[in-house]
Image (spheres, coloured by chain):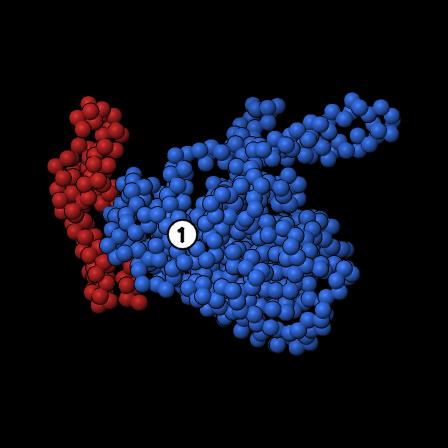
Chain colours: A red, B blue
Amino acid sequence: CHIHDSFDTFRSDERVISLHSALDNFTKAKDDFGMKMTEEQLQLLREQSQLEQELDESFIEKSLHDTICSLLKINQLKRAEHLRKQFKLSDKRWWWLRITALAEQGNFAELENF
Amino acid sequence: MSVGNNSAPHLSGSCVNFGLIRDEARRELVHLLDKCHGSKALVWDQELTEQFGLVAEYSLLKEREVDRMFPLRTPRLPKSSVQHIIFVTRPVISLMDVIASNIRKEEEGDGFGRKEFHIFFVPWKSFLCVQKLEDLGVYGALTNIEDYHLDLIALDSDVLSMENHLNFYDNNISEDGTSLYLAAKAITRIQKQYGQIPMIYGKGKSCKAICSLLQKMWSEQGDVVGDEHPQIDRLLIIDRTADLITPLVTQLTYEGLIDEAYGISNTSASFPPEKFQTTSKSEDLMTEKKKIVLTSKDDLFTILRNCNFNAVGPTLKKQAKSISEKYEERHTAKTVGEMKQFVSHLPQMQQAKASLAVHTNIAELIKEFTDEDDFMESLSTQQEFLNGIGTDKVNPYIEDCLFRKQPIVQVLRLICLQCQTNNGLKPKVLEYYKREIVQTYGYKHLITLNKLEKCGLMCGTGTSWNYNTVRKSLRLVVDDINEKEPQDIAYVHSGYAPLSIRLAEILSHPGWRSIDEVLRIIPGPTVSGLQQFKPKKKWQGSINSEGSSPNTVTLVFFVGGVTYAEVSALRFLSAKNDGHEYLTATTNFVNGNTLIQSMVEPD
């Protein structure tokens, strides 16, 4: 089926193009979930490349979870908050991420504030 | 030269002698090797080396002038002076490139004169591979291209396996029929060896297809020996898709837990070496993993493997006590005769002692594994699902795992179990999980999710499957389970009876007719009693030369994999001694992790 074809190629350098064709195929197949996920992935890629320009860190290939996690670890709380809003992160996940990141940093003063 | 079965007596301990399967595989191998006169080097596809170890030991190969063995890899073979180079490989296209480059490098020549090249395909040569060799321009350089039909390996006295690890994937994701054809061939091989099996039963997707293949293969054979006493009375084919729950539940038998924690492959498992340091040589660090063979060759393991893990401790203790008692006997030995008898038992006792030490160590490792918080929490979540509690909403523990980014296989295993016990998840819940998975582990796992849905492990509502009905009418959940002296097969999962094995149990007594309704709910077609021929009545009590037993012998063939706990449950049924014995044959062994891992997109 169409969907699998476009999956196979999305690894290549032309990932944005492949993602768009995946999006087309999901639309044809009336797979709402696949469409939504693909749209989010495109959005994530845009955010990531912007972050890479602004910060000296690599984000490509990272999932949303990992992206926010690395942002928190380098104390980019604002940017992380931005992603949280953009992708409508559940509160539970957000606080888990915050706490894990703080614990890994050994920032116990901040943890106490919860 | 004999290719007899002397080296593997542990294979012949059951009501049907599976050693014969091994003998035949050895004969075929020797026959193939003898086609090349002179010294040989075998070049192994690494996936096959362990399997071969179960069929032929090195000394047998050496007798057939096999001087060297190399692993198959690029860029070239080590230097050797043999006359024949034999590649032993699976029919996998990518390996053909490796073989071709090896041959070319070899033909460029070194000082050792001309060599002949051969390929043995296991279990059969594929047209595509031969084509590929032609395309690569090395086809002409090959003297022999042979099939080596190693399609069935006797792992133990009551277990045959095809060791075809891709079976479930091929069947349900790639929809490649080859694996079914190979399965039917394997069953035909069993029938050739032990007589045509009179009755066939089956449940699940592929059973009908296999049945028709079987009948075709049998009739094509021509000179059929139908009037012999068949040693196996019934064949029960169970397709894994008919029972997806069982592999998802954690196995709680000793052998099953070893498999969950360390993975058993080709009858052996590798453990971290620290536990097995011998005190005398503690200086040099063992860095390699300790590999231990786990078969019925080991008397103690034969008892332990089927025990619920809670019964392993007491059993080890009892064993320790009996060994030390036997040692004490030396004080009571007074006469020379008694002393002699004691001494003659010594080697046996020492072996028992060594095996006790090994299993105490393994049990300690497993204990550590089961004491971990995540193991306990996952287990209690599973129990809730199996009891039908809280299956219809997002589970807080699964959520936790997602947010902590636990290994994806672990998370998916629980979600799949929830799907199965809730007859599919409500769209809202399913979509929530799926979204969280993509957000946590990355977009590429959209493919993983797709595959899981394709094979039915993950699904939305609207299936005809109804877990609660099946659970109640087949008594899948048993409350008061005695783990130390089990009364029911449910002991293998501490309270959950594997659906597949319950089907086998009911088939023997009182028969499938009593559960018609339930069989309709379980996915896939049913084959209920296909008579291949009418056997002559068995001579009760007179044991003929082939040693067929007065019991009804059922061979359960699992398409798509079996778990170690399921095999233990079948052994438990055989040991009940109620006139029914069971043997296991399978395409491969699985557990929830390996099953799901095969669907997960690699990083």
Instruction: Report x, y in % for residue B423.
Output: 35, 57
Asked whether residue B440 is in view, the answer is yes
**Horizontal arrangement in the rendering, residue B206 relative to residue B160 (left or right):** left
Of residues B94 and B190, the one drawn nearer to the viewer in this rendering: B190
**Horizontal arrangement in the rendering, residue B365 relative to residue A89 (left or right):** right
Residue at 53% x, 51% y: name it.
Answer: B566
Q: Quadrant of residue B427?
A: bottom left
Label tally: 1
Name the residue that disc number 1 marks.
Answer: B596
Residue at 68% x, 63% y: name it.
Answer: B231
Instruction: Report x, y in % for residue B169.
Output: 43, 59
**Horizontal arrangement in the rendering, residue B53 relative to residue B6 (left or right):** left
- Up-down: is A107 above or below A4? above
In the current view of this chain or complex, which residue is farthest to the right?
B336
Amino acid type, mark 1: Ile
Of residues B595 and B426, the one drawn nearer to the viewer in this rendering: B426
Instruction: Report x, y in % for residue B106.
Output: 55, 55
- Up-down: is B358 above or below B221? above
